[in-house]
Amino acid sequence: MTVRIGSAALAALAALAAAAPACRGDVTGGSIEGPELFAKLCSACHGPDGRPPEAMALRLGVRDLTAPELRARITPALVEQQLRRGSENKLMPSFVGIASEAQIKALAEYVASPAFLRKP
């Protein structure tokens, strides 16, 4: 049986592979700054501004963190819960053991804050 992978799926897999180092060791340098943590741990899948590349959204269901329906209900607790559990489809890992408690809290506060939407 031959499995063919389209270019969008290959792009999505490449992005996941790029994010994989975040799962091995402390790539954050111990930072507890939300923007820095997002750039290093989340942007490969969610995009640098919270809008995932089309292939990631379509093929893997990566959520647009700037979507109005999400922003209307987002809280630090909701983001923290997602960071701790990972996604239901298991493509987003749990960050427990990858990021410290302080990093998880800082990242959740940042993503849920209005400052998240005001990035350059």
Image (tube, grey):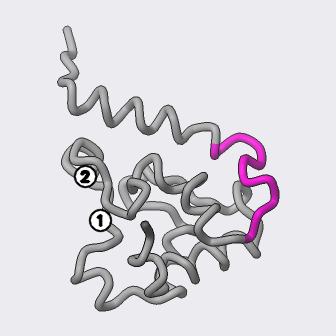
Q: Residue at x 50, y 61 (%)?
A: 86
Main SS, magenta region, reads: loop
Q: Residue at x 55, y 56 (%)?
A: 39
- Relative placement, left or right, of 77 versus 60 is right
User: Against 27, is 3 above or below?
Assistant: above
Do the numbered discs 1 and 2 sit on residues whose CB atoms are within 8 Å? yes
- The image's mark for residue 57 is 2
Which of pointers 1 and 2 lies earlier in the amino acid sequence? Answer: 2
Q: Residues within 10 Å of mark 2 (few under 14, many from 20)?
A: some
Element carrying mark 2: helix
Image quarter of residue 59: top left
Image quarter of residue 120: bottom left
Q: Is residue 8 magenta?
A: no
Q: Residue at x 69, y 71 (%)?
A: 33
Residue interval drawn in magenta: 22-32
Where is residue 97 shown, x and y percent of the image? Answer: 73, 57
- Quadrant location of the N terminus in the rendered image: top left
Q: Is residue 30 magenta?
A: yes
Seen from this angle, which residue lies furthest top?
A: 1
Amino acid identity at mark 2: Ala
Q: Relative to the observer, which residue lies in front, 86 or 66?
A: 66
Where is residue 78 shown, x and y percent of the image? Answer: 47, 83
Seen from this angle, which residue lies furthest front?
A: 120
Where is residue 37 shown, x and y percent of the image? Answer: 63, 62
User: Against 25, is 73 above or below?
Assistant: below
Seen from this angle, which residue lies furthest right?
A: 30
Which residue is tagged 1?
64
User: CA–CA distance between discs 1 and 2?
Assistant: 8 Å
Amino acid identity at mark 1: Asp
